[in-house]
Amino acid sequence: MMLHPSVESVRNRTGRSWLLGMLVALATGAGCHQDSGAAVQLVVGRRNTEQRSFVPRTALARYVELPREHNELILTLASYKASCERFVPPGPGQASVTVTLVTPPGRKPETGSYDWRGPALRGGTKSRPGHAYAEPTARIGSRSYIFPPGGSVQLKHVALDPHGRVDGLLAFEFPGDADRPAMSIKGRFHAKICRLDESD
């Protein structure tokens, strides 16, 4: 049956639009760049410029094993398009959060809670810690922030494979003191594994 030219034209346009939409979805969904749907709440000072709420555009996880020293699971959540291969600093008005979760040699990260109690309480040495810990840092624009002790990251799901992911809850919080303002990182995250370097 022959279709009216206007009907055929609409069908062709609809088909092209659908194909274009699928290509865009595949391109933007590939790799580690995603919209996690959950906002990260970042507070590093009292001023409005030191507080951010953002839904990560990039949510990635890198896992590296350093034989006889320690293992590192590095989570990066950014409000912009970051990279797994190189450091991409945030631009003006942009923000990123990095959590470095360190475990002793022979112990892989697994579900559970990992505290940040400060450098003095890592145990062992920096290259060979006595116990697991999670250290947060943050950047807003050109400024970087190191967090005093307080709070933790809770891993709800850990799949350390090339197509795996790490899900969890950020709950870092420093209440502030006479010299330093309150600081916190809160929110859920879903990060895809983008690099996996395991020792033999």
Image (cartoon, grey):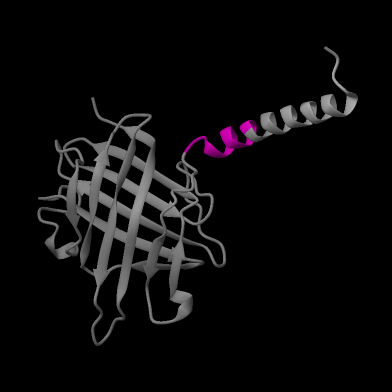
Left or right: 18 with respect to 69? right
Residue 155, image x, y percentages: 24, 47
Classify 67 as above or below 82: above
Left or right: 121 with respect to 185? left
Q: Which residue is found at the position 30% from the left and 38% from the top?
A: 64
Queried whether the magenta region covers residue 26, the answer comes back as yes
Q: Main secondary structure of the magenta part?
A: helix
Residue 70, image x, y percentages: 20, 43
Q: Quadrant of the N terminus?
A: top right
Residue 153, image x, y percentages: 24, 55
98, 24: nearer the viewer: 24
- Name which quarter of the figure residue 194 lies in: top left
73, 124: nearer the viewer: 73
Q: Quadrant of the C terminus?
A: top left
Please provide the residue range marked out in magenta.
22-31
Classify 200 as above or below 32: above
